[in-house]
Structures are given as C-alpha cells and as structure tokens.
Image (spheres, rainbow, N blue to C red):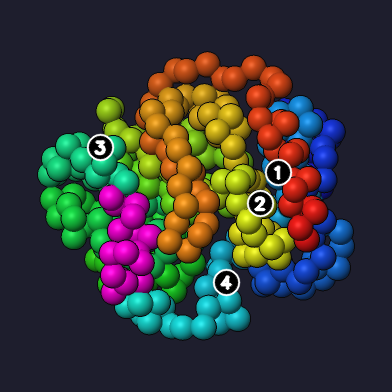
Amino acid sequence: MRQVNCYICDSDDASLVVEQKFVDKYLSLIDPTYNQGPRSLVACNVCGLVYRRPQIDEADATSLYENFRDSTVLTETPDEYFDRISSLPAGESENHAKLTWLQGHIGDFLGTPGRRVLDIGCGGGVFLHKFMEWYPGWAGFGVEPTPAFADLARRRAELEVAEQMYQPGIFERGFDLICILQVFEHVLDPITFLRGVAADLAEGGFAFIESPHLSDLPHMPADHDRFHAHHVYVYTCSTFEYMCAKAGLTVDFWGVDVTVRDKRNFSALVRRGTSEAPVFPLNDVAEVLSMSARWRGEV
C-alpha cells in the first residue's frame, strides 16, 4: 500500500468522503494486515477527483488480480458463472443493456463486418461472447490477468486472450472498438493507460468505457463492493474528460445510467483527438463535496 496525493493535480488538500473501517475482502487477498490501518475515500479540493488513500501499488495489484476470482470471493465455478450470466433474459442482463446502448450510438459502425474488437479486462469473456452473437463478422480479442478467467474466455467465448495486465501493442494494433467495462476504476495510472488505448485504436475507431459514477455514493453503503480497495478512483464527467484530453482522446458521448441492479455507471465513447484539457479548478468540486457530505450522514 502507498500514500498518495491527487493523481490529477498532485495536491494533498483533500476532504474526507468516508472513512472505511470494514474488512475489505480484496485487501485480504493481498495482505490481511492491510485492513488494520486507516483507509478512506477522499475528494481533492482543487480538482474534485475522488480517490482512495492509501492505495494499492503495482505489486499489490499484480498479486490481487492473480487471485481475483478466488473461491473466497466467488461462490461458483468459472463455468457456472459463464452459464449463469450468458443465460440471463434481456431484461436482467447488463451485457444486453450495454449492447443496446452501443447499438443506439454507433449501430451503423458496428454493422460493418471484418472489424476487430478488444475487451480489456474481459473476465470470462461473457460480454464479447454476446457481442459476437450480435455482430458475428467481428474478430474478438481479450486481455485478462486472472488465469482461470482468461482460460474461460478462450474456451467458452473462443477469443484470443492475453493472460496479463493490459499493455498497448499486445496484439497487432488497429482495433476498431476497444471495450473497457468496469475496469477503468481499477487502473492505477489512468492517463498512461488511456494513451495506450489511443495507440491501439484504428483511425476512426472508438473506445467504449463504462465505470462507476460519483452519484453512486449517496445510494450505497460504505462497505459495498463498489468502494473496496480494487476501485482506486471514482469519476465525474470533468475528471474523466481531463484524463482523456491528457491522453489525446476526445469524448464523443458521456452519460450516466442506472443498471438493472440499481448501480450508477457512466458510459462514454471516446476516439483519438486533440481536445484541450479542462482548466483548474474543475466545476464539480462543489458537487463532489455535497454528495460526500450526504453520504457521511447516512453511514
């Protein structure tokens, strides 16, 4: 674990969002003693970024994702998980909702066969398995550091999968669509990560990013899985756009939706571009502090 300042602006001026005193199951997979020290979510008073302090470091992350689907976390085998998620009816399937969202925004683009899609943090391949049913003319690739789920994605979704943390250029570059679904909040160095995504995108291609949104805070208990150690940042539109701009990406669309499980995610489509980074202070600092105050009053 490491003590950190704000990732965006390096300020150490931050307001408490919530102190965390519960046993974090993900910290327990790395080192149970990590649960003994003080832990909190804080909001930067300069730029509004919500981040965890202290944070896991690169070595901790490597250890965590090698064991991420440990039996103490999951109560089913990988194949049982794949069968359960793949068989959900449309009205209960978050993957169906994601594909419907994509269809509504870039349906014509997706309907062109012969293109390549990469899912970063593909898990067991359940999203791309459904994607390939909708768009069978595409070639699917995945990156997944957890061995049992990389194997699952190869076997059940028939994907080409790199069993490692994402690095640009793992496969031949030039992906028409890169999916980053419930992964971006895990990334310790998000601007460098996004620069890699930009390098791997084909000309005219899109990255589809979905991640927990700040508006989850007043609706979730402090010990909810959304706020455990594997999620190091919680984004607003401004903090997300800032990181994209620093990475050479333009945000084509950004919006917040509520899932069938009553979770609030932002969904974004980004592409290579040269938009300017927002100027400090970002306009959501007051919003962040207001939400965090409401949340502290409920826990």
Q: Would residue 10 be found to the left or right of residue 265 on screen? A: right
**SS for callout 1:** helix
Q: Which mark is residue 67?
A: 4
Q: Which amino acid, mark 2? A: Leu
Q: What residue is shown with label 2?
A: 217
In the rendered view, tell whether residue 279 sits above or below residue 262.
above
Q: What residue is shown with label 1?
A: 291
**SS for callout 4:** loop
Task: Identify the residue at image location x=82%, y=40%.
Answer: 15
- Judged by depth in the image, the label closer to the viewer, 2 or 4, is 2
**SS for callout 2:** helix
Q: What residue is shown with label 3?
A: 106
Q: Position of residue 183 (x, y in %)?
A: 50, 52
Q: Which amino acid, mark 3? A: Ile
What secondary structure is the magenta-colored segment mainly? helix
- Judged by depth in the image, the label closer to the viewer, 4 or 3, is 3
Q: Position of residue 282 (x, y in %)?
A: 66, 24
Q: Which mark is residue 81?
A: none
